[in-house]
C-alpha cells in the first residue's frame, strides 16, 4: 500500500489543530481546578505526594484534636473536615436561651477555650461563623423580628469573642442560617424535645 504524503499546507493544518486541541485541554484543566475547593486541592496534593502538607487543614485538624484531648473537651467539641473547610462545633451547641443571642454564662468558658485553638492559624486562613436557631417561631414580644436576624446576632456574638482572643475581624465573616440546617438525627437520639431544641441553638466556627 502506498503511503500518503502530506503537503506542507496539510502539515501546517495538522499542527494548528494539535495546538487548538492542547489549548482546549489546558483551559478545561484550569476550569476544573477553579471548581475544586482549597480543602480538596490540599487533599489531592497529599495523596499525590504521600506527604501531608505542614499547614493543610487535615494537619490542623489533627493538632486541634490533640489540643481538645489535652483540654479535656472530647465530650463537648467535635471537628469535621469537608470541601467547605474545617468545622469546629460543640456537640451540645454553644447554647443560647430561646430567642436570645446572649451566650449562656456557663458556656462562655468552654467557648473561649474552643476559640483560642484557632489563634495559631489566623494568619493563613479565614473564618466563617455560622449562627443557628431552634425551630420555634419568633413571638410578638421578642426583640427579634425573625430567626434569620437572631441567628446572625448569635454568629456576631461569637465573632466578637474571636476578636477578643486575637483574630482579626477582617478574617471573619458571619453567616446566619436560622433553623434551616438541622442536626443529624443520630446526634439527637435519646434527647427530650427541649434538649433537642437547645442543641439547635448553636454556633459553628469554620476555618477555610
Image (cartoon, helix red, strand yellow):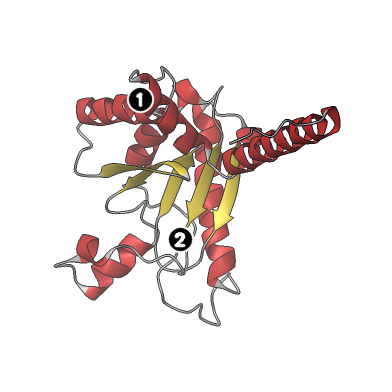
Image position of 8 (left or right of 163): right
**Which of the image's four quarters has the N terminus?**
top right
Tag 1's secondary structure?
A: helix
Q: Position of residue 108 (x, y in %)?
A: 38, 43
Mark closest to the chain's N terminus, 2 or 1: 1
Residue at image coords 64%, 42%: 28
Q: Which residue is mark 1?
A: 59
The residue where tag 2 is placed is 132
**Residue at x 58% of width, y 49% of height:** 174
Q: Give the quadrant of residue 79.
A: top left
> From the viewer's perspective, is 143 left or right of 111?
right
Identify the residue shown where x is 53% and y is 44%.
128
Q: Nearer the viewer, residue 33 or 71?
A: 33
Q: Nearer the viewer, residue 13 or 109?
A: 13
Foreground tag (2 vs 1)? 1
Tell whether label 1 touches label 2 (CB within 8 Å): no
Q: 84 and 155: which one is in front? A: 84
Left or right relative to 171: residue 9: right
- Front residue of 206 and 4: 4
Who's the residue at 34% across and 31% down the image? 61
Q: Secondary structure at mark 2?
A: loop
Task: Quadrant for residue 56, please give it.
Answer: top left
Numbered badge on residue 98 = none
Q: Is residue 10 left or right of residue 78?
A: right
* 3D distance between C-alphas at marks 2 and 1: 28 Å
Q: Name the residue furthest left.
A: 190
**Circle 2 Cα neighbour tier, 10 Å, few/some/many (<14 / 14–19 / ≥20):** many
Amino acid at each position: 500500500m502506498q503511503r500518503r504524503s502530506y503537503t506542507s499546507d496539510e502539515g501546517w493544518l495538522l499542527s494548528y489543530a494539535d495546538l487548538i486541541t492542547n489549548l482546549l485541554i489546558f483551559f478545561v484543566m484550569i476550569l476544573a481546578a477553579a471548581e475544586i475547593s482549597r480543602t480538596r486541592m490540599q487533599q489531592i496534593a497529599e495523596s499525590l505526594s504521600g506527604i501531608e502538607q505542614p499547614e493543610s487543614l487535615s494537619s490542623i485538624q489533627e493538632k486541634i484534636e490533640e489540643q481538645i484531648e489535652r483540654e479535656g473537651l472530647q465530650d463537648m467539641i467535635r471537628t469535621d473536615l469537608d470541601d467547605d473547610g474545617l468545622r469546629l462545633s460543640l456537640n451540645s451547641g454553644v447554647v443560647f436561651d430561646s430567642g436570645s443571642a446572649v451566650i449562656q454564662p456557663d458556656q462562655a468558658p468552654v467557648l473561649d477555650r474552643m476559640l483560642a485553638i484557632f489563634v495559631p492559624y489566623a494568619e493563613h486562613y479565614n473564618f466563617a461563623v455560622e449562627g443557628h436557631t431552634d425551630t420555634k417561631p419568633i413571638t410578638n414580644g421578642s426583640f427579634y423580628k425573625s430567626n434569620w436576624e437572631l441567628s446572625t446576632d448569635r454568629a456576631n456574638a461569637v465573632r466578637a469573642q474571636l476578636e477578643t482572643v486575637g483574630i482579626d475581624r477582617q478574617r471573619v465573616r458571619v453567616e446566619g442560617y436560622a433553623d434551616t440546617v438541622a442536626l443529624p438525627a443520630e446526634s439527637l437520639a435519646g434527647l427530650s424535645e427541649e434538649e433537642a431544641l437547645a442543641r439547635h441553638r448553636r454556633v459553628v466556627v469554620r476555618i477555610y
